[in-house]
Amino acid sequence: MEAEPLILVTVARTDGSAPREVGAWMAVTAVGLTGTVGGGHLEFDAIARARAALAGGELAAEVRYPLGPSLGQCCGGVVWLRFERVEAGEDLAERLPQPPLRSLAVFGAGHVGQALAAMARELPLALHWVDSREGQFPAGPLPRGWRQEACDPPALAVPDLAPGAAVLVMTHNHAEDFEIIAACLRRQRERGDLGFIGMIGSRSKWASFRQRLEARGFTADDLARVTCPIGVPGVAGKQPAVIAVAVLAQILALPPA
Protein backbone atom coordinates (compact mmCIF):
# COMPACT_ATOMS: atom_id res chain seq x y z
CA MET A 1 0.00 0.00 0.00
CA GLU A 2 1.25 3.47 -0.83
CA ALA A 3 1.84 5.84 2.11
CA GLU A 4 1.35 9.02 0.07
CA PRO A 5 -0.47 10.03 -3.10
CA LEU A 6 1.45 9.79 -6.35
CA ILE A 7 1.05 10.19 -10.07
CA LEU A 8 1.57 7.10 -12.20
CA VAL A 9 3.01 8.08 -15.60
CA THR A 10 2.84 5.38 -18.28
CA VAL A 11 3.96 5.24 -21.92
CA ALA A 12 0.56 4.75 -23.56
CA ARG A 13 1.56 4.89 -27.24
CA THR A 14 4.58 5.56 -29.42
CA ASP A 15 5.11 6.41 -33.07
CA GLY A 16 8.56 6.15 -34.62
CA SER A 17 11.73 6.26 -32.54
CA ALA A 18 11.06 6.51 -28.80
CA PRO A 19 13.27 6.14 -25.70
CA ARG A 20 11.00 3.60 -23.97
CA GLU A 21 8.45 0.99 -24.95
CA VAL A 22 4.69 1.03 -24.41
CA GLY A 23 3.97 0.08 -20.79
CA ALA A 24 7.11 1.67 -19.32
CA TRP A 25 6.15 3.58 -16.20
CA MET A 26 7.27 6.07 -13.59
CA ALA A 27 5.73 6.79 -10.18
CA VAL A 28 6.11 10.42 -9.06
CA THR A 29 5.54 11.66 -5.52
CA ALA A 30 5.98 15.19 -4.18
CA VAL A 31 9.64 14.51 -3.47
CA GLY A 32 10.46 11.07 -4.85
CA LEU A 33 10.60 9.09 -8.08
CA THR A 34 10.55 5.42 -9.08
CA GLY A 35 10.98 4.07 -12.60
CA THR A 36 11.57 5.94 -15.85
CA VAL A 37 9.73 6.77 -19.07
CA GLY A 38 12.88 7.65 -21.00
CA GLY A 39 14.79 10.45 -19.32
CA GLY A 40 15.70 13.78 -20.87
CA HIS A 41 13.26 16.66 -21.35
CA LEU A 42 10.39 14.22 -21.88
CA GLU A 43 10.74 12.90 -18.37
CA PHE A 44 11.58 16.33 -16.92
CA ASP A 45 8.30 17.73 -18.24
CA ALA A 46 6.32 14.67 -17.09
CA ILE A 47 7.69 14.98 -13.56
CA ALA A 48 6.85 18.70 -13.48
CA ARG A 49 3.28 17.99 -14.66
CA ALA A 50 2.83 15.23 -12.10
CA ARG A 51 4.09 17.33 -9.19
CA ALA A 52 1.98 20.28 -10.24
CA ALA A 53 -1.07 17.98 -10.12
CA LEU A 54 -0.07 16.67 -6.69
CA ALA A 55 0.12 20.29 -5.52
CA GLY A 56 -3.49 20.87 -6.58
CA GLY A 57 -3.24 21.61 -10.30
CA GLU A 58 -5.22 19.99 -13.06
CA LEU A 59 -4.05 16.63 -14.46
CA ALA A 60 -4.36 15.84 -18.14
CA ALA A 61 -5.17 12.17 -18.68
CA GLU A 62 -2.83 11.88 -21.68
CA VAL A 63 -0.24 14.18 -23.20
CA ARG A 64 1.39 13.94 -26.65
CA TYR A 65 5.15 14.63 -26.82
CA PRO A 66 6.82 15.09 -30.23
CA LEU A 67 10.46 14.16 -29.65
CA GLY A 68 11.99 16.86 -31.79
CA PRO A 69 13.88 20.14 -31.37
CA SER A 70 11.03 21.81 -29.47
CA LEU A 71 11.47 19.28 -26.67
CA GLY A 72 15.26 19.22 -26.91
CA GLN A 73 15.35 15.53 -27.89
CA CYS A 74 16.38 14.07 -31.21
CA CYS A 75 14.64 10.68 -31.19
CA GLY A 76 12.33 11.94 -33.92
CA GLY A 77 9.25 9.98 -32.89
CA VAL A 78 6.20 10.75 -30.79
CA VAL A 79 5.32 9.51 -27.29
CA TRP A 80 1.93 9.69 -25.59
CA LEU A 81 2.14 9.62 -21.78
CA ARG A 82 -0.81 8.68 -19.60
CA PHE A 83 -1.13 10.36 -16.17
CA GLU A 84 -3.12 8.69 -13.35
CA ARG A 85 -3.47 9.70 -9.72
CA VAL A 86 -2.94 6.96 -7.13
CA GLU A 87 -4.26 7.90 -3.72
CA ALA A 88 -2.53 7.13 -0.42
CA GLY A 89 -3.61 3.66 0.64
CA GLU A 90 -4.06 2.33 -2.89
CA ASP A 91 -1.87 -0.54 -4.07
CA LEU A 92 0.35 0.76 -6.88
CA ALA A 93 1.24 -2.77 -7.99
CA GLU A 94 -2.37 -3.37 -9.04
CA ARG A 95 -2.21 -0.40 -11.41
CA LEU A 96 1.11 -1.18 -13.06
CA PRO A 97 1.26 -2.66 -16.57
CA GLN A 98 2.41 -6.27 -16.56
CA PRO A 99 4.95 -6.78 -19.36
CA PRO A 100 5.34 -10.25 -20.89
CA LEU A 101 8.09 -12.34 -19.33
CA ARG A 102 10.48 -14.74 -21.06
CA SER A 103 10.70 -18.11 -19.31
CA LEU A 104 14.23 -18.85 -18.11
CA ALA A 105 15.21 -22.04 -16.30
CA VAL A 106 18.50 -21.92 -14.40
CA PHE A 107 19.94 -25.13 -12.99
CA GLY A 108 22.43 -24.27 -10.26
CA ALA A 109 22.44 -21.83 -7.36
CA GLY A 110 26.19 -21.50 -6.94
CA HIS A 111 28.22 -18.32 -7.37
CA VAL A 112 27.26 -17.71 -11.01
CA GLY A 113 23.66 -18.76 -10.48
CA GLN A 114 23.34 -16.38 -7.54
CA ALA A 115 24.86 -13.48 -9.53
CA LEU A 116 22.62 -14.23 -12.49
CA ALA A 117 19.46 -14.40 -10.38
CA ALA A 118 20.27 -11.11 -8.63
CA MET A 119 20.53 -9.33 -12.00
CA ALA A 120 17.51 -11.13 -13.45
CA ARG A 121 15.26 -9.52 -10.83
CA GLU A 122 15.45 -6.30 -12.85
CA LEU A 123 14.77 -7.98 -16.20
CA PRO A 124 11.58 -9.21 -17.93
CA LEU A 125 12.27 -12.83 -17.04
CA ALA A 126 10.20 -15.51 -15.30
CA LEU A 127 12.90 -17.54 -13.54
CA HIS A 128 12.49 -21.21 -12.67
CA TRP A 129 15.55 -21.77 -10.48
CA VAL A 130 16.54 -25.35 -9.65
CA ASP A 131 19.24 -26.78 -7.38
CA SER A 132 19.69 -30.18 -5.75
CA ARG A 133 20.67 -28.63 -2.42
CA GLU A 134 18.07 -27.58 0.15
CA GLY A 135 18.63 -24.10 1.57
CA GLN A 136 20.75 -22.90 -1.34
CA PHE A 137 18.35 -20.19 -2.44
CA PRO A 138 18.27 -16.70 -0.88
CA ALA A 139 15.38 -15.89 1.41
CA GLY A 140 12.79 -13.23 0.66
CA PRO A 141 9.84 -12.59 -1.64
CA LEU A 142 10.06 -13.71 -5.25
CA PRO A 143 9.39 -11.48 -8.27
CA ARG A 144 6.37 -12.09 -10.46
CA GLY A 145 6.60 -15.37 -12.33
CA TRP A 146 9.53 -16.76 -10.31
CA ARG A 147 9.82 -20.25 -8.85
CA GLN A 148 12.60 -21.81 -6.74
CA GLU A 149 12.77 -25.60 -6.59
CA ALA A 150 15.03 -27.95 -4.64
CA CYS A 151 15.07 -31.13 -6.74
CA ASP A 152 17.45 -34.06 -6.37
CA PRO A 153 18.39 -35.10 -8.97
CA PRO A 154 17.70 -31.79 -10.72
CA ALA A 155 17.18 -33.43 -14.13
CA LEU A 156 13.77 -34.53 -12.84
CA ALA A 157 12.62 -30.91 -13.12
CA VAL A 158 13.18 -30.74 -16.89
CA PRO A 159 9.80 -32.18 -17.97
CA ASP A 160 7.98 -29.51 -15.95
CA LEU A 161 9.75 -26.49 -17.46
CA ALA A 162 7.54 -23.95 -19.20
CA PRO A 163 7.16 -24.42 -22.97
CA GLY A 164 9.54 -22.13 -24.80
CA ALA A 165 11.86 -21.81 -21.80
CA ALA A 166 15.51 -20.98 -22.28
CA VAL A 167 17.60 -23.35 -20.17
CA LEU A 168 20.93 -22.57 -18.52
CA VAL A 169 22.88 -25.40 -16.88
CA MET A 170 25.44 -24.32 -14.28
CA THR A 171 25.31 -26.67 -11.30
CA HIS A 172 28.13 -27.43 -8.87
CA ASN A 173 28.39 -30.98 -10.22
CA HIS A 174 29.39 -32.13 -13.72
CA ALA A 175 27.40 -35.35 -13.32
CA GLU A 176 24.27 -33.27 -12.64
CA ASP A 177 25.06 -31.04 -15.62
CA PHE A 178 25.32 -34.07 -17.88
CA GLU A 179 22.00 -35.58 -16.83
CA ILE A 180 20.21 -32.23 -17.15
CA ILE A 181 21.53 -31.78 -20.69
CA ALA A 182 20.49 -35.34 -21.57
CA ALA A 183 17.01 -34.69 -20.16
CA CYS A 184 16.73 -31.46 -22.17
CA LEU A 185 17.71 -33.25 -25.37
CA ARG A 186 15.15 -35.99 -24.71
CA ARG A 187 12.50 -33.33 -24.22
CA GLN A 188 13.53 -31.66 -27.48
CA ARG A 189 13.13 -34.98 -29.28
CA GLU A 190 9.69 -35.51 -27.77
CA ARG A 191 8.27 -31.97 -27.77
CA GLY A 192 10.78 -29.62 -29.45
CA ASP A 193 9.59 -26.80 -27.24
CA LEU A 194 12.67 -25.48 -25.42
CA GLY A 195 13.84 -22.12 -26.71
CA PHE A 196 17.53 -22.48 -25.86
CA ILE A 197 19.80 -24.99 -24.13
CA GLY A 198 23.08 -23.60 -22.79
CA MET A 199 25.71 -24.92 -20.41
CA ILE A 200 28.50 -23.17 -18.59
CA GLY A 201 31.91 -24.70 -19.21
CA SER A 202 34.89 -24.97 -21.50
CA ARG A 203 35.06 -26.41 -24.99
CA SER A 204 36.90 -29.42 -23.56
CA LYS A 205 34.02 -30.05 -21.13
CA TRP A 206 31.57 -29.98 -24.01
CA ALA A 207 33.77 -32.28 -26.10
CA SER A 208 33.71 -34.83 -23.27
CA PHE A 209 29.94 -34.47 -22.89
CA ARG A 210 29.45 -34.87 -26.64
CA GLN A 211 31.20 -38.23 -26.64
CA ARG A 212 29.12 -39.50 -23.72
CA LEU A 213 25.88 -38.20 -25.21
CA GLU A 214 26.67 -39.83 -28.55
CA ALA A 215 27.20 -43.09 -26.66
CA ARG A 216 23.65 -42.70 -25.34
CA GLY A 217 22.33 -42.44 -28.87
CA PHE A 218 22.02 -38.69 -29.36
CA THR A 219 22.71 -37.56 -32.92
CA ALA A 220 24.73 -34.64 -34.28
CA ASP A 221 21.44 -32.80 -34.87
CA ASP A 222 20.47 -33.34 -31.23
CA LEU A 223 23.83 -32.10 -29.95
CA ALA A 224 23.74 -29.03 -32.20
CA ARG A 225 20.90 -27.74 -30.00
CA VAL A 226 23.31 -27.20 -27.09
CA THR A 227 25.37 -24.02 -26.71
CA CYS A 228 28.58 -24.40 -24.69
CA PRO A 229 30.36 -22.21 -23.66
CA ILE A 230 27.58 -19.68 -23.02
CA GLY A 231 27.62 -15.88 -23.03
CA VAL A 232 28.02 -13.23 -25.71
CA PRO A 233 31.40 -13.47 -27.47
CA GLY A 234 34.21 -11.17 -26.42
CA VAL A 235 33.47 -11.03 -22.68
CA ALA A 236 36.54 -12.67 -21.22
CA GLY A 237 36.21 -12.13 -17.45
CA LYS A 238 35.53 -15.12 -15.21
CA GLN A 239 34.09 -13.30 -12.20
CA PRO A 240 30.53 -14.55 -11.49
CA ALA A 241 28.98 -11.14 -12.17
CA VAL A 242 30.83 -10.79 -15.49
CA ILE A 243 29.69 -14.24 -16.61
CA ALA A 244 26.13 -13.43 -15.51
CA VAL A 245 26.06 -10.22 -17.57
CA ALA A 246 27.34 -12.00 -20.68
CA VAL A 247 24.87 -14.87 -20.31
CA LEU A 248 21.84 -12.67 -19.63
CA ALA A 249 22.71 -10.53 -22.64
CA GLN A 250 22.70 -13.70 -24.74
CA ILE A 251 19.29 -14.70 -23.39
CA LEU A 252 17.77 -11.26 -23.99
CA ALA A 253 19.05 -11.35 -27.58
CA LEU A 254 17.14 -14.55 -28.37
CA PRO A 255 14.15 -14.21 -30.69
CA PRO A 256 10.76 -14.19 -28.94
CA ALA A 257 9.69 -17.61 -27.74
Image (tube, rainbow, N blue to C red):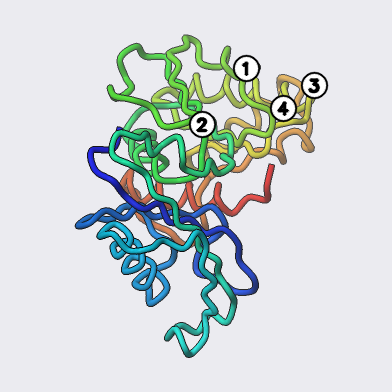
Asked if marks 1 and 3 touch (Cβ < 8 Å), the reply is no
Rendered image: mark on residue 169: 2
Q: To which residue does mark 1 refer?
A: 160
How far apart marks 2 and 4 lie (CA) works out to 19 Å
Q: Tell me if residue 231 comes above or below residue 215 in the rendering.
A: below
Q: Residue furthest left?
A: 31
How far apart marks 1 and 3 lie (CA) works out to 13 Å
Asked if marks 3 and 2 touch (Cβ < 8 Å), the reply is no
- In front here: 161 or 53? 53
Mark 1 or mark 3: whose residue is earlier in sequence: 1
Mark 1 or mark 2: whose residue is earlier in sequence: 1
Q: Secondary structure at mark 3?
A: helix
Asked if marks 2 and 4 touch (Cβ < 8 Å), the reply is no
- Of circles 3 and 4, which is in front? 3
Instruction: Classify residue 209 by image quadrant.
Output: top right
Q: To which residue does mark 4 refer?
A: 214
Q: Tell me if residue 83 comes above or below residue 226 in the rendering.
A: below
Three-letter amino acid code at disc 4? Glu
- The quarter of the rendered structure image containing the N terminus is top left
Rendered image: mark on residue 190: 3
Mark 3 or mark 2: whose residue is earlier in sequence: 2
Residue 67 relative to residue 43: left or right:
right
- Of circles 2 and 4, which is in front? 2
